[in-house]
Amino acid sequence: MPLRLKKLIGAFLLVALVIVYALLASIFAVARLSESGPWVHFLFFLFSGLLWVLPAMGIIKWLMLEPRAKR
């Protein structure tokens, strides 16, 4: 795969990940945390604010892989 195409796909994947993850985290927070205390909100947003990094790291590692040599 050409490097430019790989970077384009990776950029779209990262943007899509952030958008979908933010929507899902917000929906979950509104549905489940409406009557919770401030410490529960703080812990949820701390955890969910850091959790998206794991799939993003996978995408970035895929972007950093060297292309296979053609035989």
Image (cartoon, rainbow, N blue to C red):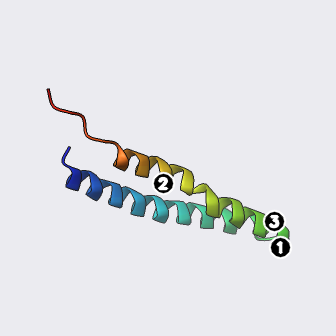
Label 2 secondary element? helix
Label 3 secondary element? helix
Mark 2: which amino acid?
Answer: Ala
Q: Is residue 51 left or right of residue 32?
A: left
Q: CA distance from mark 3 to mark 1?
A: 5 Å
Image disc number at residue 38? 1
Q: Nearer the viewer, mark 3 or mark 2?
A: 2
Mark 3: which amino acid?
Answer: Val
Q: Earlier in the sequence, mark 1 or mark 2?
A: 1
The residue located at (83%, 73%) in the rendering is 38
The residue located at (77%, 63%) in the rendering is 43
- Kindly check if marks 3 and 1 are in contact, taking CB atoms under 8 A apart as contact: yes
Residue underneath mark 3: 40
Residue 45 spot, x, y in % from top left:
69, 66
Residue 47 spot, x, y in % from top left:
69, 59
Q: Is residue 68 above or below residue 7?
A: above
Image disc number at residue 56? 2
